[in-house]
Amino acid sequence: MYEQFEAYITSQATLTQDELRMIRSLASTRRVRKRHFLLREGEICQHKIFVAKGLLRSYHVREDGSEHIMRFSPENTWTTEHDSLFSQIPSRIHIEALEDSEVVLFTRESLEKIHFAIPEFKAYIDRFLTSTLSQTYERIMMNLSYSSEEKYQDFITTFPDVFNRVPLHMVASYLGVSRETLSRIRHAQAQKE
């Protein structure tokens, strides 16, 4: 599973074999079974997670039991609970495997060592964080200004692979619409085709 991470990171940054060995020495790998958690709300997040295989979801559960999915993380993506990891405060979200998954884990300390020792890796992380911030901003704008139909269309265009791998109630949760609304939108889309 580390090989998947190495293939990904070398496609994003130019790294020497010594740098790759150092990164490998500071990473750990883990297989996570479907429906198992990498993080539960209230725990202190210990890792930045790279998904080598499988699919994770990050979500919050409200007091009434409703779930609000914040992110799906398929292969070749990162996830974590940044506030908890870097400030060492209790997590406000759960991170759960939706499929049997393989992940590469980095502690806060190991990331700091890598950033300090490998400027190209730090530059990659800076680019990645800028991209993530832009995506988050776009998601906020979408939630504030898109119709339910536009949110649905954006999701299936942006995440076609994820759409086919998760139940519709999770798509509805991610979009912030009811299952009934999502069913209505899908039915209307099917009528147009």
Image (tube, rainbow, N blue to C red):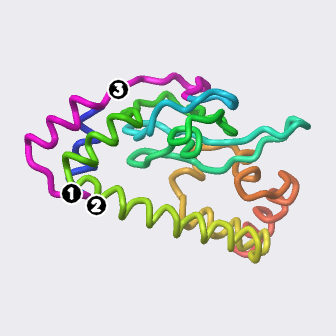
Q: Position of residue 41 (x, y in %)?
A: 69, 31
Q: Position of residue 18 (x, y in %)?
A: 8, 40
Instruction: Tell me: 165 left or right of 6.
Output: right
Q: Earlier in the sequence, mark 3 or mark 1?
A: 3
Disc 2 target residue: 123
Q: Position of residue 12 (x, y in %)?
A: 26, 58
Q: Is residue 99 above or below residue 6?
A: above
What's the distance in space between the residues labelled 3 and 1, CA to CA? 23 Å
Q: Nearer the viewer, residue 139 or 33?
A: 139
In this rendering, which labeled residue sits more in front, label 2 or label 3?
A: 2
Q: Disc 3 marks which amino acid? A: Thr
- Which quadrant, please, contains the N terminus? top left
Q: Disc 1 marks which amino acid? A: Glu
Disc 1 target residue: 120
Disc 3 target residue: 29
* Secondary structure found at label 1: helix
Start-end of magenta stretch: 12-38
What's the distance in space between the residues labelled 2 and 3, CA to CA? 23 Å
Mark 1 residue crowding within 10 angstroms, few (<14) / some (14–19) / many (20+): some
